[in-house]
Amino acid sequence: MERTLVIIKPDGINRSIAGEIIHRFERKGLKIVGLKMMHLSDELLDEHYEHHKGKPFFQKLKDFMKSAPALLVVLEGNNAVEVVRIMAGPTRGYEALPGTIRGDYSISQQHNIVHASDAPETAEKEIKRFFADEEIFPYKRIDWEMVYAVDER
């Protein structure tokens, strides 16, 4: 099983759609193994968005991400990174198709509701950045045999 990180950004929190977003992932068959709300610090944001340092929008992005708490979610499932990325839709909300999270709830490039890890290696680093080992809760989901075929578990 693969794990991935989703951050429901301040716009998702302020618009009261966090539950709907989590519900979509659960309905798809992904398992929540970590969940917490937090105010993101400058240090965490500098590390998380290091690839954007020096770009004109960097400070605005950080200010936006600090404008309200974020909800951090670790999801687990087969191909979890790819599944979540497809469900989230393209980064720019105005390019995202209806039916995706961004297609249904975003028209902005920056206020795009969720962050989703872009690769399994990135997901692993991001999960460690935001979650201590004791904040991840492995468990056997009782409906797993209905979600996955025998050879997929």
Image (cartoon, helix red, strand yellow):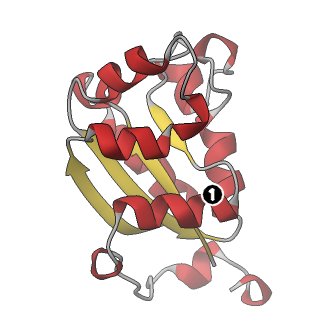
Foreground pick, 53 / 25 = 53
Q: Residue at x 35, y 80 (%)?
A: 133
Does 33 sit above or below residue 45? below
* Left or right of 95 in this view: 132: left
Instruction: Please give the name of the residue rendered at 63% of the width and 57% of the height, measured from the top-left corner.
Output: 122
Q: Amino acid at mark 1?
A: Thr
Quadrant into which the N terminus falls: bottom right
**Residue farthest toward the right in the current orientation of the protein:** 151
Q: Residue at x 71, y 53 (%)?
A: 82
Q: Position of residue 98 (x, y in %)?
A: 63, 21
Q: Residues within 10 Å of mark 1 (few under 14, many from 20)?
A: some
Q: Which one is in front, 145 or 93?
A: 93
Relative side of 146 to 112, left or right: right
What residue is rendered at 60% in x and 84% in y? Answer: 145
Q: Could you tell me if residue 29 is visible in this image?
A: no
Question: Where residue 26 sits: x, y (%)?
Answer: 46, 58
Residue 73 x/y as whole percent: 39, 56
- Per the image, label 1 sits on a secondary structure element best described as helix
Q: Is residue 79 visible?
A: yes
- Image quadrant where one finds the C terminus: bottom right
The residue nearer to you, when weighing 70 against 140, is 70
137 left or right, relative to 77: left
23 versus 79 height, above or below? above
Relative image position of residue 150 (x, y in whole percent): 73, 89
Mark 1, residue position: 122
Occupied quadrant, residue 111: top left
